[in-house]
Amino acid sequence: MTMIPMTGGGGLFIEEELKRILGLKIDVDTYQGMKRGVPRLLSLLREERLTATFFLSIGPDASGRAVFQLLKNPRFLKKMVQTRAASLYGLRTALYGTLLPSPLIALSFPDLVRQIVEEGHEVQFHAWDHRRWQDELTTHTETWIRDWFKLGINGFQKLTGKKPTAFGAPAWLIDDRVLSFAHNLGFEYVSCTRAKKPFIHETADLIEIPSDLPCFEEMGIEGATRAILSGLAEGGIHVLPVHAEVEGGLWSEPFLDLIRAVKKREYRFLPLCDILQLLDREALMTRRFHLRLLPGRSVPCAV
């Protein structure tokens, strides 16, 4: 079989396997997203006979601490209004970690985690405490980062009986310290950036499988749908970031419509671990990430 480069250059792939592939990267960030969003997404994926990758937040839901961002980041307030956050996430989520105690996310639902695995989906590590990483990573020490990974991975092992083989950073926020820890922990790949194609991280020799398509919550339903379908027009390998709280919540029907539109374009849906097997490591570019504020986001992320 002929080997060809993926759209935009980069790695080489078996032609017949690469024509149109989409990975669904489902991030579970909150307690309500785990409790309500994940079952809805599992039902949708079962109905459409698709497999995906679930990146799980393991520990406390401290979403209510986002109120501190409202006081110092006007872009965050704008995003909350544009996405109708109160409807998407619910009142209780807005109080967790402040007026209400923080419930554990994946650790509260061991049976649901087993169901994800039993239905053939990939499960990987997303976070211990998503909110504190997203808001405070740059202010914390290496010891804090080490303890954060230790708590999260121990919880992941308790739920699944094995260590995660990949890491997807909360809010696509990383620094060199994070990549060093990820390398030392032996992850097979990471999915921590927004970029057009897979690459190898310069500082950690780790394969990155990035999200190259926009989120619903960044552009709204109509805008995101247009941008996603436009991005898929030329074929190749793509990764769509999905949030259990959003596409598994109020916007589940538009998400289902999008999935069906993508299927009509003859795309195959693969978990990220299967996409990894299609990559030729020797042909991937080695690149260094940087932080940039993307449209629809309130804080910079790694690109």
Image: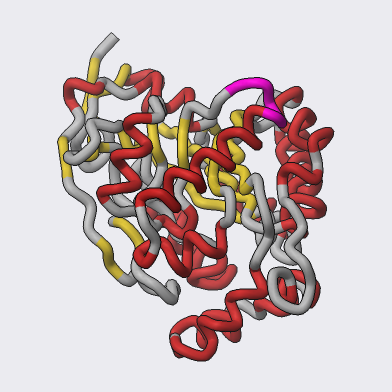
Residue 165 on the magenta segment: no
The residue drawn where x is 68% and y is 26% is 160
Q: Is residue 274 above or below residue 10?
A: above
Viewer-side residue, 204 vs 151: 151
Question: Nearest the camera: 116 or 263?
Answer: 116
Q: Quadrant of the C terminus?
A: bottom left
Q: Which residues are magenta?
A: 158-162
Please state the total of marks drawn on the protein image.
0
* Among the 4 quarters of the image, the one containing residue 264: top right
Residue at left 59%, top 68%?
Answer: 221
* Residue 79 in view here: yes
* Location of residue 242 in the rendering, given as x and y in whole percent from the top left corner: 57, 52
Residue at x-position 39% and y-position 73%: 299
Which of 139 and 67 lies nearest the eye of the viewer? 139
Q: Is residue 280 above or below residue 110?
A: above
- Give whichever of 61, 286 is nearer the camera: 61
The extreme front residue here reads: 143
Decide whether the magenta segment is chiefly helix, strand or loop: helix
Left or right: where does residue 42 sit relative to residue 275? Answer: right
Q: Is residue 40 left or right of residue 259?
A: right
Residue 123 location (% of width, % of height) = 61, 32
